[in-house]
Structure formats: structure tokens, C-alpha cells
Image (cartoon, rainbow, N blue to C red):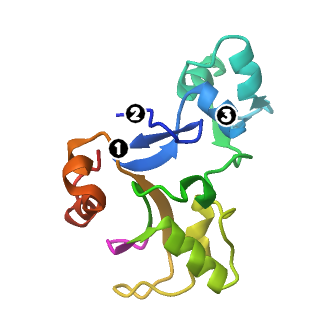
Amino acid sequence: MDVAFEGLAKGWTVRGGVVSPGDLVADYAAREQGVQGVCRGRGCSRRLDLEPKALSAIGLGLLSMTVVKKMWQCQRPDGCRLDYHDTAPEAPLRLAQFVGRPNVRVRLRCRASPCKFHRVWRVEEMIAALRKRGQGGEATAVDKLGAMMTSPCPLCKKAAWTAEALWVDTGSVGWKVNGERAFEAIESGETLT
């Protein structure tokens, strides 16, 4: 379920307690993130760039980008082989956007299969650790944090990290009752709300 949280940067949403990119065309425009397509069909050299700001300007901002992608598919008898990929957002999610928010944490997870190890940090602690190691600070993009972690996982001994921002709704009963302890639900595998 997508929820609009007050104070969250435009173009982003919270799903299951994890801050993630929104799928609407307007969300892509807010993140300044384009979509490129290349046809993999035999004898076809079709390429296209979907520009979310232009699509929003003509009234398509509230459509899902998935729907817009389907609108551009061809009607070949053997099916459309148009493959899309998102470009990197020019307005990524940065640590500075979460400084001073007690309801936000950064979670580092091991991506190695089947390892499930993760660790949750306060945003300010993560910024201080990055500065101490000379690797970044407030301007560091959340999606780049995993690649910056060079130490191996204590369980599987592989250095395959990914990072994500966790957001607990301050209007939820869990937050009102538990406050910052609401993040303990992560340890038990519950969904944050």
C-alpha cells in the first residue's frame, strides 16, 4: 500500500515501512528520472526516451509508468520486444533529507542468498560513520550506501550490501505506543506502518 507521508521528498513513497520510488509519471518527474526503451525484436531498431516532465505536462502525471510503457508497445504479430530501463534519478534520496527525524532509520542488508543479516542505523550515526571513514556525509545517496560498505557480513562472510530507508508513520498506533522502539518490529519481520 502506498501512503503519502508528510515531509517525504516528492517522487518517493513508503511501502511496508520502506521508502521506495513512486510509480506514477509525476513521481518520475519529481525525481528527474527518465525511462529509456530499446526494441530487442529482430529487424527492429526502435529506441525511445520517455520524458516524465513532458508526459506530466500533457496530463499523464497520474498514470502509472507501467501503463505508459505499455502504451508505447508495438503491435507486431510476434509480440513487442521493447525493453525499458530507468535512468538514474537526478534527484535521488539523500541522507540529508532524513536528518533530525526520529521516525527514520537506514537499514543495511546482506544481499547474499540465503543470508538474512541486516543492521539498522540512525541517520545521524550513518552520516558520522561515513565522515569518519572519509566516504561521504549528508549528501550521500541512500542507494549508494550498500556499495560503500566493504566489510563482510558477519554471517556469510560476503561483502554484498544494499541500503534502504525505513520510515515509521508517526500517526500510527505503533509509533504512539512504542516511539523509537517501533523499529524493533523489523527484527521480528513485521511490516512497519
Q: Which residue is mark 2?
A: 3
Horizontal and vertical percent for residue 65? 58, 27
Amino acid at dot 3: Ala
Q: Specify few, some or many for label 1: CA neighbours under 10 Å numbering under 14, 14-19, or 20 or more.
A: many
Q: What is the spatial separation of the Cα atoms under label 1 and label 3, in whole angstroms?
A: 22 Å
Given the image, on which type of amino acid does mark 2 rest? Answer: Val
Task: Answer above or below: position of 108 versus 33.
Answer: below
Mark 1 lies on residue = 169
Q: Residue 86: x percent and y percent?
A: 66, 42
Residue 37: image quadrant is top right
The one nearer the camera, 114 or 88, is: 88
Q: Are marks 1 and 2 in contact (CB under 8 Å)?
A: yes
Q: Is residue 154 left or right of residue 138?
A: left
Provide the residue span drawn in magenta.
Answer: 108-119
Split into 4 quadrants, where in the image is the N terminus? Answer: top left
Instruction: Choose the circle earlier in sequence order: 1 or 2.
Output: 2
Left or right: residue 145 versus residue 29 is: left
